[in-house]
Image (cartoon, rainbow, N blue to C red):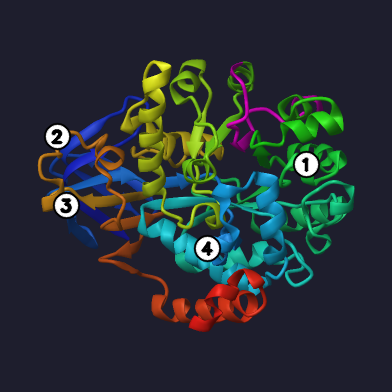
Amino acid sequence: MITLFKNANAIVSCDEKDTVYYNTDLLVEDKIIKTISKDINIKADRVIDCKGKNIYPGLINTHHHFFQTFVRNLETVDYPNMSVPQWLDTIYPIFSLIDNQVIYYSSMTAMADLIKHGCTTAFDHQYCYTDKTGIEAVDYQMKAASQLGIRYHAGRGCNTLPKSKGSTMPDVMVESTDTFLNDIERLANKYHDPNDFSMSQIVVAPCQPINSYKDTFVESVKLARKLKLRLHTHLGEGENSIMMDRYGMRTLDWCEDIGFIGDDVWLAHCWELNQEEYKRLANYKTSISHCPSPAILGGFPILPMKQLKEFGTHVSLGCDGSATNDSSNLLDAMRIAFLMQCYFGKERGGSISGYDILKMATYEGAYTLGRKDIGHLKENMAADLFMIDASTLELTGTIHDPKNIIPRCGVTGNVDLTMINGEIVFENGKLTKIDETKVNSDGEKVCTDILRNNSDAFTPYKNGF
């Protein structure tokens, strides 16, 4: 399949030189970008008129919890009035009801939302394993990702420490370390493709240090390095006092002590870290996945992005789970991140640009996931991109700066087109590979049957069903 994007107003490459091409064509052959240049004349299967349109690299989401998508828009579990451990104690009883039908449809919902807003590669931290899901949750997510056509990196998570030992986990969501590690090997054998243009990969991702035995993390490091898989966990989101009581050290020190750190590791949130710890992450080339929406919702400290950039700390962008975000829109996350930094910069001597935020969601996202074939637009890179219409009335007067337009001007609605691996998966307001109306209807029924009918959290709303 040859697709020719003709005469784009701007192609923002997000490459090493921050190249922007104006009034330029982009040629895709099968899954690869073959040429970016003016006046390409070639017989193509499809020619897309891009006059007035801007093209960007596909966005890369580096932290999410798809299973939470059916536990959102609930005032009964409102995040802003609780600490993270308090919120976990409140919401985990709902999570314990989840089965694989919830996993499948909530994943379809989250990934569809991501695609519609320009995301082409998604990482999900799936740590919700119950008696009802068994070990097959990631299998259901892989099915959903394949049907939608999105690149999917699955973080096989776990929690091994029972509540009686000091975790926030209900017993029904606790696994053994052996069960976790054995399933990692199963999933890696079945789905992990380390090659260029891979559509599926597996990540070793124990949920968080306070909810697992130390041995779970120690063995995770060993297995990940043996299988050449990446490592991920939550860190620096309010757990340091618990870690000090339990181990006599802060969480990053604990991770460093067991080897859960390095250029094959990335950590979600990290708003509780100090300057010295941020510098250590830079030295180890360990990335942070910044999730601005839950930070605002929970009233947590704002990451010092300008300082992190000066330290050389790698930072990518994540939506986080819908229970602490209520959407899976990475364009919206970019806008929020930009405004947060503008506010923060007034007190700390300067902010970062909207384009810096775009690079976090593209180039840095690729670094975080260990991918060299995605994250920017260049010949021989994967044909992962999205397009917006910059010629609409509401954007009049903004076309002079396509690099900054999305975060600065609040371009957060559906994109015009999303292409993944050379295939158009969203266009003209519609997902191209699924019957969206049917999936929506089936998903609502599953949400009602499994969650709304069985959780007190939904009680105030049950009369409406």
Nearest to the eye among marks 3 and 2: give it: 2
Secondary structure at badge 1 equals helix
**Residues at badges 4 and 2 in contact (C-beta under 8 Å)?**
no
Nearest to the eye among marks 2 and 1: give it: 1
Vertical placement of 176 versus 243: above or below?
below
Q: Percent from the top left, x then y, of residue 431?
A: 36, 68
Secondary structure at badge 2 equals loop
Q: CA distance from mark 3 to mark 4?
A: 28 Å
Residue name at image x 70 percent, y 29 percent: 261
**Residues at badges 3 and 4 in contact (C-beta under 8 Å)?**
no
Q: Mark yes or no: residue 49 visible.
A: yes
Which is more N-terminal, label 1 or label 3? 3
Residue name at image x 40 percent, y 75 percent: 436
Viewed as shown, does residue 216 lie left or right of 455? Answer: right
Q: Which residue is mark 1?
A: 210
Which is more N-terminal, label 4 or label 1? 4
Give the amino acid at mark 3. Cys
Q: Percent from the top left, x then y, of residue 9?
A: 15, 43
67 or 167, nearer to the observer: 167
Which is more N-terminal, label 1 or label 2? 1
Picture disc at residue 145: 4
